[in-house]
């Protein structure tokens, strides 16, 4: 980046950008200075983040070819922006049977998918007697036990690598899922306790309390689980609070080394929710959040922005991201059903026009797949058999795994 470009920045912002470009870890004060970027400083910040990415990573942008498996859309929490969760009296409420799950996973396998993304509400059995009854019909007492069994089934019978987003779990539950998955995830979303107060989007969502979520991510680190997390922007948090959330993730990653990617997800208003009329972050705001994530988290971290949540996602490559996340040729985004996935060949052309090769990755990133400490021994050899010499995904359909040790 040229010196004249940096002169467009005010001193505190320039100090932070220069430190990042020189390969120095930003102090908390420098990171928080990025929250004050305004006007003509935005494109300078984007350029700095893109330069940092290009210095630290090969000219490759990745995605994961996946199937989206909504194990259950029942949840004990109520978030003001969510249309995924339903009451058990709603005809749209559904807990998938093993046959339904296997059918989706096998169809995805035939289409070359390698990831089975399991999404579900937080502990619905604590709220809905009907869900407890459904679990018993499937031979289980808890949603987590059922999820673990379904991950095992999909892994053994289709070879897809499970990636569960199961909400708040204890050490034992995380450990059990680790034995049947290649990675796990949970969005931090925000560290703002304000959002959990009266009238806030998380007022009726105890599992969204920042301290609870940070403790969960810490447990995943202690268990050496390759973990995906990130921030959700536009739900009422301040820009400074976004940076504080990134700093919290950085601290956890520096302690345990387990956060394999940070997602910067933009809020989308949905009809029928309390936040249906709330404003959505624009492209400039999203690009700046992505750039800030790059500068705070450093060149080695994978920074992801979901392309289906932006009408014009191409410019996101200018802000330092290197990953598009999961893209499915089969299943919709059940959390954001109004937002269809982009065409993978279209993504490929977009990346090529910007000077990057689009490569398919596995749900577990190469550096974690190579490290015996991170992926459970019962999953590791199978996951490695799906990877090429770079640790990215081999083309074609995965082969079923013969068995996972009990």
Image (spheres, grey):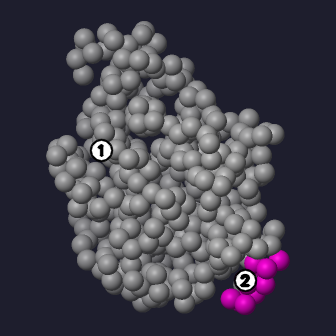
Task: Place residue 52 in its image quadrant.
Answer: top left
User: Which badge, 2 or 1, is on the more N-terminal residue?
Assistant: 2
Q: Nearer the viewer, mark 2 or mark 1?
A: 1
Q: Is residue 386 magenta?
A: no
Give the residue number, with chain letter if any, for mark 2: 135
Residue occupying the point 42% across, 77% down: 160
What is the x, y in percent for residue 84?
61, 63
What is the x, y in percent for residue 154?
49, 82
Secondary element under disc 2, as helix, strand or loop, is: helix
Task: Place residue 380 in its image quadrant.
Answer: bottom left
**Dominant secondary structure of the residues highlighted in magenta in the image:** helix
Give the residue number, with chain letter if any, for mark 1: 314
Q: Is residue 87 above or below residue 278?
A: below
Q: Is residue 401 above or below residue 241?
A: below
Residue occupying the point 34% across, 38% down: 320
What is the x, y in percent for residue 74?
70, 69
Rounded to the nearest angstrom, the CA distance separating label 2 from label 1 is: 43 Å
* Region rendered in magenta: 129-139
Circles 2 and 1: CB atoms closer than 8 Å: no
Report if residue 199 is visible in the image: yes
What is the x, y in percent for residue 335?
55, 60
Who is closer to the viewer here, 67 or 384? 67
Who is closer to the viewer here, 83 or 164? 83
Report if residue 255 is visible in the image: no
Is 8 positioned to the left or the right of 277 in the image? left
Tell me if mark 2 has few (under 14), some (14-19) or many (20+) residues whose alpha carbon lies within 10 angstroms of its own.
some
Q: Is residue 135 magenta?
A: yes
């Amino acid at each position: 980046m040229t010196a004249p470009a940096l002169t467009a920045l005010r001193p505190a912002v320039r100090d932070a950008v220069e430190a990042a470009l020189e390969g120095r870890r930003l102090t908390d004060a420098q990171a928080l200075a990025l929250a004050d970027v305004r006007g003509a400083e935005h494109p300078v910040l984007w350029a700095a983040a893109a330069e940092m990415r290009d210095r630290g990573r090969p000219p490759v942008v990745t995605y994961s070819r996946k199937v989206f498996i909504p194990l259950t859309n029942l949840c004990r929490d109520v978030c003001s922006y969510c249309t995924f969760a339903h009451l058990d009296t709603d005809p749209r409420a559904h807990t998938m049977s093993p046959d339904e799950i296997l059918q989706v996973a096998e169809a995805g396998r035939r289409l070359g998918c390698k990831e089975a993304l399991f999404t579900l509400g937080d502990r619905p059995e604590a709220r809905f007697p009907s869900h407890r009854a459904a679990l018993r019909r499937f031979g289980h007492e808890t949603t987590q036990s059922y999820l673990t069994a379904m991950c095992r089934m999909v892994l053994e019978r289709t070879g897809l690598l499970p990636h569960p987003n199961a909400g708040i779990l204890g050490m034992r539950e995380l450990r059990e899922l680790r034995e049947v998955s290649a990675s796990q995830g949970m969005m931090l979303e925000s560290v703002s306790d304000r959002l959990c107060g009266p009238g806030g989007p998380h007022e009726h969502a105890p599992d969204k309390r920042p301290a609870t979520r940070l403790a969960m991510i810490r447990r995943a680190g202690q268990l050496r689980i390759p973990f995906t997390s990130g921030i959700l922007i536009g739900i009422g948090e301040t820009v400074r609070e976004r940076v504080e959330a990134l700093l919290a993730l950085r601290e956890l990653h520096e302690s345990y080394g387990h956060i394999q990617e940070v997602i910067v997800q933009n809020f989308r208003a949905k009809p029928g929710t309390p936040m249906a009329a709330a404003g959505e972050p624009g492209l400039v705001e999203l690009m700046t959040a992505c750039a800030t994530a790059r500068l705070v988290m450093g060149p080695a971290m994978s920074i992801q922005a979901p392309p289906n949540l932006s009408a014009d996602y191409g410019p996101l490559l200018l802000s330092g991201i290197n990953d598009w996340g999961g893209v499915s040729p089969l299943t919709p985004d059940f959390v954001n059903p109004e937002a269809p996935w982009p065409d993978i060949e279209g993504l490929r052309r977009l990346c090529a026009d910007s000077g990057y090769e689009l490569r398919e990755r596995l749900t577990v990133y190469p550096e974690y797949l190579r490290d015996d400490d991170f992926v459970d021994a019962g999953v590791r050899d199978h996951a490695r058999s799906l990877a090429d010499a770079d640790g990215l995904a081999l083309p074609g359909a995965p082969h079923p795994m013969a068995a996972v040790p009990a």
